[in-house]
Amino acid sequence: MSQSSLAEEKFDISDVYEEKGRYCRFVQTADGSYVLKPVKVPAHVKAARAEQRRRREIRRHAQENRQRAQSVNARSVAFLAVALMFFAMVCCAFLAMQNQVYSRSVRIASLEAQISEMAEENDSTEKRLAASENLLEVEMVARQKLGMQYVDEDQIEYYTADDSDYMLQYGDVD
């Protein structure tokens, strides 16, 4: 390449200067010295540098997003505090309801036990009243008012009866 062809070559300043510097080459002048002259930056280098800038920008945005996501600000702390208080109130309400259910079930069991005891006491009182009738009084009423008499020996018939008519059960039978 001759000097005249270099002088005629026009350079666009955006093609020569970039962030990383510029592309240059040594050119010998007429007096024999060498001078650095800018040359046009190749398209593949421009594309590679643009791709690097794009990737750096993406990494920077991603890092900013990560920092923003990890940062704890006053609104998020307030929201978490309110959510925690709500959760604690719900848990306390649940425990209070569970305690009421338990105490009521204990009260019901106690009342059922009292009912069972009273029913058993009523049955035993009825038996005692039935057994405590005065037999002498019954005999007097039978003889005087009804005209009944004792039986003779030949009128008596004996039989055996099971005592299984009535039974008190104090526990489960397996």
Image (tube, rainbow, N blue to C red):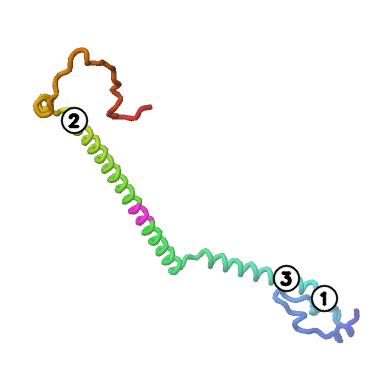
Question: Which mark, residue 51?
Answer: 3
Would you say residue 35 is visible in this rendering? Answer: no
SS of the residue at dot 2? helix
Nearer-the-camera pick, 161 or 28: 161
Q: Which mark is residue 168?
A: none
Question: Mark 2 or mark 3, which is nearer the start of the sequence?
Answer: 3
Disc tally is 3
Q: Where, by quadrant of the figure, is residue 158 drawn?
A: top left
Report if residue 93 lies within the magenta region.
yes
Task: For marks 3 and 2, give the CA distance.
Answer: 111 Å
Callout in the foreground (2, 1): 2
Residue 70 is situated, as x and y percent measured from the top left of the image, at 52, 63
Report helix, strand or loop for mark 3: helix
**In this rendering, is residue 117 above or below 51?**
above
Residue underneath mark 2:
130
In screen coordinates, is 107 left or right of 36?
left
The residue under label 3 is which amino acid type?
Glu
Q: Residue at x 90, y 81 (%)?
A: 2
Mark 3 vs 2: CB contact within 8 A: no
Q: Which residues are magenta?
A: 91-97
Which residue is at a point 61% across and 70% down the rendered structure image?
61
Circle 1: is it few (<14), some (14-19), or many (20+) Cα within 10 Å? Answer: few
- Residue displayed at 35% across by 27% down: 173
Question: Which of the marked residues, 2 or 1, is nearer the chain's N terminus?
Answer: 1
